Image (cartoon, grey):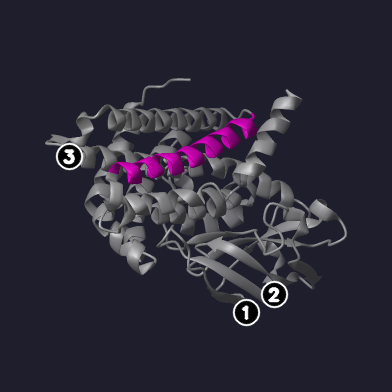
Amino acid sequence: MEFTLTEEQRQIRDTVAEFVDEEVVPRAAEIDETDEYPADLVDEMADLGLMGMPFPVEYEGAGLDYHSYAIGLEEISRGSGGLGTVVAAHTSLAGNMLYEFGDEAQKQEYLTALNTADDIGAFALSEAEAGSDVPAMSTTAERDGDGYVVNGGKLWISNGSVADTVTLFAKTDPDAGRNGISSFVVRPEEDDGFIVEGTEDKLGDKGCPTAELRFDDMWIPEDRLLGEEGDGFVHALKTLNGGRITIAARSVGIARAALNEAKSYAQQREQFDRPISDFQAIQHKLADMDTKARAAELLMHEAADLKMRDEDYIKEAAQAKLYASEIAREVANEGIQIHGGYGYTKDFPAERFYRDAKLSEIYEGTSEVLRNTIAQQLLDE
């Protein structure tokens, strides 16, 4: 594995970093305060090709490798954790479902519009009683002529209230367990019975609407089925596995933001007639913060490298997501500590980084579930 960025990867990093510094960072506190979906920033990212980074140009994607995608998402998340989730849910989940499991017609119609951000994507898997336990879902899709009638509901759906294309999981054979789950493309504006019940008031991740969805006798045509009936559980696992790399990227971006802010504050804040960065206790905190962020970044790129080479990366993606999400919280926590009392106020972004970091330990596989996955893969080696 090559640890030096290519010229193209450096250009991607610098281009996204410049956009983030000029457009996202100045808006981050406002987004956090209002919790409004920043549609204008999404449009600007689309103009830069950031809403379809890893997909081929034939579908209007940017054709970037997964390292570049992770680097881009890391930079976006450095500016706003919520905006990072908007991009990750849109690209890694909804977009990847269509790219990996859609037929050519579905890719041309739906993936192309996602890559240009003419449409926004969401991934509807979780339910109130079926989070980590996917086969416990109760949403059903029953055959009805040349289509399906969907009934049920989904919870915790990132982008759910603003999405134009939703990849939905439902049971087509309720008695078959995980083998009875299928996946579909849903179009909220076209499909009667698609209802947004509301959005969550979350601790962090502001700007990314997290919706509760309900489906009341929602009919969808059979050409919206992804793959074959019964493929949905495998689709979900494969998609989430790749998505964990990008949640690691989001976490690294937040950790870097927390580190940069803490370093800057420590160099300016004086106590006992000297900057607090002169004190060894603060230096050790900064050293540990940087080391953890660097280690998480390397785990992220190792998983991305395996994915690009089409090798098994289940364990590596789980490790990257687990470690990066936990160190992001730890680094953000130390950032607050370095700020002292100011870190506990909204006058500085330190507390926002902590709130944004916490989510990464929960979604797309909790830390507890990921430890199970890692152990199972390790014992099977």
Give the residue displayed 63% in from the left and 40% down from the top: 370
381 on left or right of 240: right
Which kind of residue does numbered mark 1 sit on?
Asp
Q: Position of residue 374 (x, y in %)?
A: 66, 33
Which kind of residue does numbered mark 2 sit on?
Trp
Q: Foreground: 42 or 33?
A: 33
Do the residues bearing badges 2 and 1 touch, measured as CB atoms within 8 Å?
yes
Residue neighbourhood size for the residue with mark 2, other residues' Cα within 10 Å, grouped as few (<14), some (14–19), many (≥20): many
Residue labelled with disc 2: 219
Q: Foreground: 154 or 312?
A: 154
Q: Foreground: 375 or 117?
A: 375
Question: Separation of disc 2 and disc 3 at Cα?
Answer: 66 Å
90 on left or right of 284: right
Which kind of residue does numbered mark 3 sit on?
Gln
162 on left or right of 307: left
Residue extending furthest front?
272
The mark that comes first in sequence, 3 or 1, is: 1
The residue stretch that appears in magenta:
312-338
The numbered mark at residue 192 is: 1
SS at circle 3:
strand
Q: Position of residue 295 (x, y in %)?
A: 45, 28
Work out whether 255 lies above or below 29.
above
SS at circle 2:
strand
Q: Residue 173 magenta-drawn?
A: no
Give the residue displayed 34% in from the left and 46% down from the top: 336
Residue labelled with disc 3: 271
